[in-house]
Amino acid sequence: MKYLKLIAIEYGIWLYIIACLAWLLFRLFALSMPAWFILIEPLLLAALLVISGSSVAAKISGEEKVKGFWQYEAALAILLSIVMAWVIVEVRPLAFITQGSNTTAILKGLFNPNTEQLVPMLAALVETIYLALLATVLAIPFAFLLSFFAAKNLMFDSLIGRIVYFLIRTISTIFRSIEAIVWAIIFVVWVGIGPFAGMLALWIHSVAALIKLYSEQIENIDPGPVEAIKATGASTLQIWRYAVAPQILAPYLAFTIYRWDINVRMATIVGFVGGGGIGLALYQQQQMLSWRNVGLIIWLIALVVWIMDIFSGYIREKLISN
């Protein structure tokens, strides 16, 4: 059974390596490998390396005596990954160096912002800040409550608890994996263009993200107080209230402020698809090629992000230290 597991892991690694080689040969030289070779050759290599005790799989599995060839195998996989990324992304250093003149108009606008538009842009910026604030505030109660059900150390005592744990974790992971800009597109269709759609997009993404942060903090608490209160016959809610909550409140506040910091930045992005705020103004000015207005907006965004970063960092440091 042990060797089958090692062979399976090693097969996956060599399947990746040979598939990358086949793709590069086809992409760069129009040479193709037969499918049977791509599927069968990794199995032969995997079996040979596992038997010889020099596989990456053995190193990953914590085997004590692994021969040195695994280092070359790992280096080959990493090198192929970098080459694949370079080719797929179509990196063009020459274009980067020689075509900088295309950005002349943008750079002129960036360093010569149109201050006549300061007042309306400030209004849009304020809208962005409060949009992010409301999304964060509304996400707190949902994330706070659900985080207890998403903590393994609190929910693994019973079958029902495990089911609830996996359900909450799965849903929050799915919602978190869908970027806020996608949620903004959905809510723009749902409730129309404007800051309300942007707020809903940030809210649902914040709930999912905070569930992860909050629940992981619960999983890292000191189990001593939990066991002590549990020994007195306390109910689940009493355990959460008196043993868990006091240990997590300060980190929760730090995570929440950090999330507000993130939401201010993300609010700019969701504005590009109709989520309101200064992001929408930035998109409109960019479409009209009003680069001086774009420059003003960029400087305002940078200023607010800088202030938020310093403020949130200071608050998080004070909360965690206390």
Image: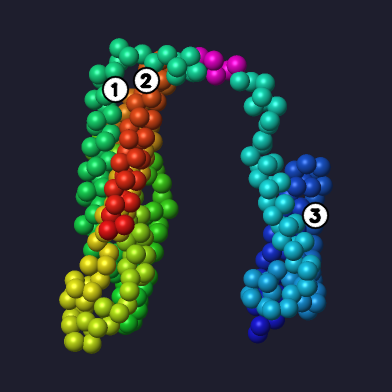
Going by the numbered disc 2, the residue's amino acid type is Leu
Q: Nearer the viewer, residue 139 or 250?
A: 250
Q: Nearer the viewer, residue 93 or 193?
A: 93
Gap in angstroms between the C-alphas marked 1 and 2: 8 Å
* Residue 270 location (% of width, % of height): 36, 37
Please report the residue visible at 68 percent of the width from the left and 51 percent of the height from the top. Answer: 81
Q: Which element type, helix, strand or loop, lies under badge 3?
A: loop
Going by the numbered disc 3, the residue's amino acid type is Met
Image quadrant in which the N terminus is located: bottom right
**How busy is the neighbourhood of tag 2: few (under 14 within 10 Å), some, or many (20 plus)?**
many
Q: Is residue 246 left or right of residue 54?
A: left
**How busy is the neighbourhood of tag 3: few (under 14 within 10 Å), some, or many (20 plus)?**
some
Image quadrant in which the C terminus is located: bottom left
Let me know if residue 103 is in the magenta part: yes
Q: Is residue 86 left or right of residue 155?
A: right
Going by the numbered disc 1, the residue's amino acid type is Met
* Residue 231 location (% of width, % of height): 23, 87
Q: Which residues are magenta?
A: 101-105
Please report the residue visible at 74 percent of the width from the left and 71 percent of the height from the top. Answer: 55
User: Is residue 204 among what the camera can see?
Assistant: no
Contact flag, marks 1 and 2 (Cβ < 8 Å)? yes
Please give the residue where the numbered disc 3 appears in the rendered image.
33
Please give the residue where the numbered disc 1 appears in the rendered image.
121
